[in-house]
Image (tube, grey):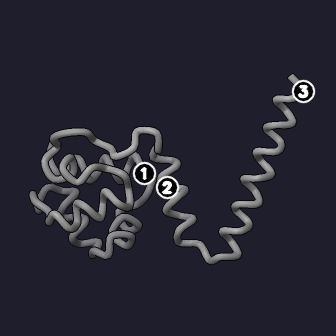
Amino acid sequence: MTLGERIKMIIKECRISQIEFAAALGISINYTNLLANDKKTTISDTLAKLIEALYGYRAQWVMSGEGEKTVDRELSASKADIMRRVQKMPEHEARATLAFIIALESVNNDFADDL
């Protein structure tokens, strides 16, 4: 699997666009396109570590395709996406999201008690 294929996989699994991927990493959309289309076949260790920190894909795997793919198998792509989005939210939206999660847990607990 090429670097471009791994980058495309990360973008697909995280359910984000190339534009969102580029913005989160602080790189240009043009550079992202070069990576995704195998026009650029290597990335810096720093960028690979940033991808690891933001998206949970091991830097070594991103760079070479070798080793474990993800840092934390417990954290799915959907959960990682939620975490990234919450980090970008203004504080009042984060509090509202937390209130929603707490309410959802309460409903789930009430439902489980009825079984």
Q: Which residue is mark 1?
A: 14
Please give left or right for residue 107 compared with residue 31 in the image.
Answer: right
Crowd class of label 3 (few under 14; some 14 to 19; many from 20; radius 10 Å): few
Would you say the residues marked 1 and 2 are in contact, meaning their CB atoms lie under 8 Å apart? yes
Q: Which mark is residue 81?
A: 2
Residue name at image x 27 percent, y 49 percent: 58
Mark sitting earlier along the chain (1/2): 1
Q: Amino acid at mark 2?
A: Asp
Q: Image height check: is 97 above or below 4? A: below
Q: Which mark is residue 23?
A: none
Q: Distance of mark 3 from mark 1, alpha carbons? A: 35 Å
Mark sitting earlier along the chain (2/3): 2
Residue 28 location, quadrant: bottom left
Q: Quadrant of the N terminus?
A: top left
User: Residue reaching furthest right?
Assistant: 114
Q: Amino acid at mark 3?
A: Asp
Residue name at image x 76 percent, y 60 percent: 99
Q: Amino acid at mark 1?
A: Cys
Coordinates of residue 81 in the picture (x, y in percent) = 49, 55
Residue name at image x 25 percent, y 39 percent: 68
Q: Distance of mark 2 from mark 3, alpha carbons? A: 32 Å
Q: Nearer the viewer, residue 62 or 40?
A: 62
Q: Which residue is mark 3?
A: 114
